[in-house]
Amino acid sequence: MSTGKINFLSLILLKMLFFCNVSNSQICSVAPYNENFNIGIGTFLNNGWILDSGGTQSLNTGPSDDISGGGNYIYYEASGSPQDTVFLISECFNISSLTNPTLRFYYHMYGANIGTLNIYINNNLEWSLSGNQFNSWNLSQIDLINYSGIDIVVTFSAVYGGGWAGDIAIDNIEISEPLPGCTDSLACNYDAFAIVDDGSCLYPAIAPYFEGFGTGSLPLGNGCNWFKSELMGDGWQFNGLPEYAASYNGRDTGTYAWVDFSNSDSAVVLEMEPVNMVNLTTPALFFDYFSDLDTFLTIWQNPSLNKLFIETWDGLNWNLLGSFQLNISGWNTYYKYLTNTAYINDIVKIRFRAEESQSGGSNYLNDLLLDNVRIENIVFGCTDSLACNYDALANIEDSSCCYNTSFSTISITSCDSYSVNSSIFNNSGNYNINYINSCGCDSVISLELTIFYSDSVFVTDSSYTSYIWGSQNLTQSGLYVDLLTNINGCDSIVYLDLTIFYDSMSNVGLNNILNYTKSASERIDILGRKNNSFKKSLQFIINNKGRVKKYLIIE
């Protein structure tokens, strides 16, 4: 329990005038107690607070309505010549009937010059908050267990923050048992003060996640709620038409979120509901973004480009994930990896924060638009739906797209036949070939085909002692077969009928003569022996490879 004291003469005088004596429990009101200010300020003693409904008299500060809607609240007006400190003092309360006595209240602290709101219990400072808490009502609870057995007086004190945009409001003050609520710390509506779980817990959405802003209002969320706030400005909007280049964005109103920079805008925040990424292996944030200034506007005004920041929550602080200050035509899709960013137990909280680039100037020409926010795995592939290998699951283009293609005429030369796509062509000609390419697309090839054929050759030859044929050195007479390549590059079969002469031919001196002729009166066979059966002139030529060429000359 804090020991801070209120050392203000005015407060002391007010308490002296107050009818309640906290030492006498018999005249104190018995808790539970509630005051919503709808019919006045009740039993409170007031020094400077103002009873109000609707909005306060200053723009960009104070609430626009009470916590329940249509009722009253009480607030500190920071415009004009405000008091440095104002007080709202309760009667005394007997809290002995409460098992877990709790002070509960709503506060609204919105504006650039917010000071401090202090809560005192019997002059002890038990709660204090300073600075802008954005444009929303917030619930706070103070545990009063240390005051069990004694009566209490509650004092609400608002302190001036140094400017007119510093209105502070309170509403719906209650002293009672803690309200039932969500007691699960993993839930996004976890209530640290709740003792009894009432089944109201809301849990983060499960990725893959998508929000397309199709309701024309702040998304309710798939598990928890979205949240928006702004330090100054109109905040994120979900309906209506942006201005200038953004009004021609090509999408229907009510189907995207946008920021109007007509006024001074700062810390314009759109916070996503938390998303559980436990099912993702390569998680990333994707979104469509529009920040387009057409050529005319650029030449006319040289407008300033407004900024968009993407941030993630680590449980203590918001961390920058990326920033954008762009002038690019139309809608564009961007993504940011989430694998190395700040999140808690696979649960990521992301916010989009818009800021004007400078105070005044031409910021109003650059409204920012946001659409199709999603958290999913990164999948590389063809993202063009016109491609035949379009991948509906792909969200990152990898330049693999293939399309239906007709190739120019190609010329092919082949031996004996040509085969393609199970078709066999045996003759030269022009053919159209339909086939499926490597991407699975229908394609056409115009084929000019020339067919050459293999040969079959029979050769008869002879040699003395040995015969060189290709890579072989043949030393025996016989029939040989080899596979060679013809002049067109086709395989050809060559048959060789080979005769090898041995030393038995030495009687004719074939190693020492180039030409050998017998007279016509003598008949000889191929070995030069007498033979009267034929009347021929024989000529033998021995070349440098040892081959014997035979010529028969008929006389």
Image (cartoon, helix red, strand yellow):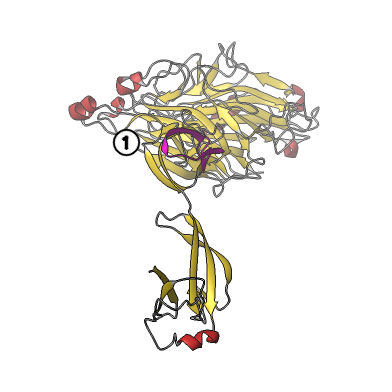
- Number of labels in the image equals 1
Is the N terminus in the top left, top right, bottom left or bottom right quadrant?
A: top right
The residue stretch that appears in magenta: 419-440
Q: Where residue 175 sits in the image (x, y, percent)?
A: 70, 26
Q: Tell me, yes or no, whether the highlighted magenta stretch contains residue 437.
A: yes
- Callout 1: SS: loop
Residue 546 in which image quadrant? bottom left
Tell me the amino acid under the disc marked 1: Ser
Q: Where residue 248 sits in the image (x, y, percent)?
A: 34, 19
Q: Residue at x 74, y 39 (%)?
A: 146
Q: Relative to 38, is 357 on the left or the right?
A: left
- Residue placed furthest toward the front: 521
Q: Is residue 49 visible?
A: no
> Foreground: 454 or 95?
454
Residue indicated by mark 1: 357
**How many neighbours does mark 1 have within 10 angstroms: few (below 14), some (14-19), or many (20 or more)?**
some
Q: Relative to 387, is 368 on the left or the right?
A: left
Q: Is residue 56 visible?
A: yes
> Foreground: 257 or 234?
257
Q: Where residue 47 sits in the image (x, y, percent)?
A: 51, 24
Is 111 rendered above or below residue 185?
Answer: above
> Foreground: 434 or 83?
434
Is 413 rendered above or below residue 554?
Answer: above
Q: Tell me, yes or no, whether the highlighted magenta stretch contains residue 540.
A: no
Is 280 rendered above or below residue 227?
Answer: below
Residue 367 in which image quadrant? top left
Q: Relative to 30, is 416 on the left or the right?
A: left
